[in-house]
Image: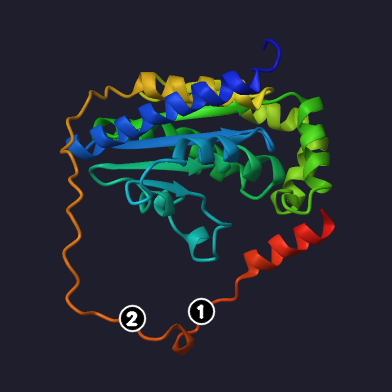
Amino acid sequence: MSKRMPKALYKAELKALQARLVDMQAWVQATGARIVVIFEGRDAAGKGSTIKRVSEYLNPRVTRIVALPTPTERDKTTWYFQRYVAHLPAAGEIVLMDRSWYNRAGVEHVMGYCTSAEYHRFLHQAPIFERMLVEDGIILLKYWFSVSDIEQERRFHDRANDPMRRWKLSPNDVSSITKWEDYSRAKDTMFVHTDIPESPWFEVDNEDKRRGRVNMIAHLLSRIPSEPVSRENIVIPERPASGGYERPPKDESNEIPDYAATVAARAGDTA
């Protein structure tokens, strides 16, 4: 990857791509399309921040982010794909999966959270499952976010030293430093079994997050066969004349304190 994308250029292009995402969402609603986008990759590779940029201006009633927690004891007794099926889109919906059923081929396998039989069963069933989704009309896109070991470690240190982002750093994340090659082998094996014509993997070089986000969103848009959708103009009506309504006295309501005024006064005192 070349040098870091200039911030001004990145912000301008990102805003243009986000506008196209809004248009694409309108097409999804109008046509009843169903879209699933899977975000997988190394820990701290920038999946979450990219999802945030993809969904920033989209309607949350149409575009949902799915980030499932650790399986419950009941989940562990069901068919592995069962809890993911419940989150698949209906007509006119987009689902962005922040990690997915590929947990089994990655962290579960590397960390020993599944048996060898469960792991190999997954590698066999995943392509079958995905072919069924695509055959039923779902547009399935799978993105793998890559980052170097040096950059990953730098991001880990940034998170560890940032109280606002420390929650992003789990014990499993930290252990990925010592299991770098194990995760690399797991990813290679996963690709061998699941990089199929019906739902291929697309790799995102996310060493530079700005460039990676722009590249990923542009590619996503190129894979959706959306067309411009005409939308009705929204006419804002004139407000009618007052009918005599009077608002109750403000001192009878539980209005929150003006904290902003306190902040402004404090800033004035220290200026």
Where does label 1 land, which residue? Answer: 255
- Left/right of residue 211 with respect to residue 241 in the rendered view: right
Front one among 182 and 14: 14
Q: How is the image coloured?
A: rainbow
Up-down relation of residue 136 to residue 235 (above or below): above
Front one among 156 and 190: 156
Q: Indicate the quadrant where residue 270 lies.
A: bottom right
| Three-letter amino acid code at the position of disc 1 | Glu
- Left/right of residue 12 with respect to residue 84 in the rendered view: right
Determine the residue positioned at 60% across, 28% down.
145
Q: Residues within 10 Å of mark 1 (few under 14, many from 20)?
A: few
The secondary element bearing badge 1 is classed as: loop
Where does label 2 land, which residue? Answer: 247
Q: Indicate the quadrant where residue 157 lies.
A: top right
Instruction: Tell me if residue 50 can be seen.
Output: yes
The secondary element bearing badge 2 is classed as: loop
Tell me residue 164's x, y (percent). 73, 53
Instruction: Tell me if residue 105 can be seen.
Output: no
Determine the residue positioned at 18% across, 55% down.
238
Do the residues bearing badges 2 and 1 touch, measured as CB atoms within 8 Å?
no
Determine the residue positioned at 23% across, 23% down.
227
The quarter of the image holding the N terminus is: top right
Tell me residue 245's x, y (percent). 24, 79
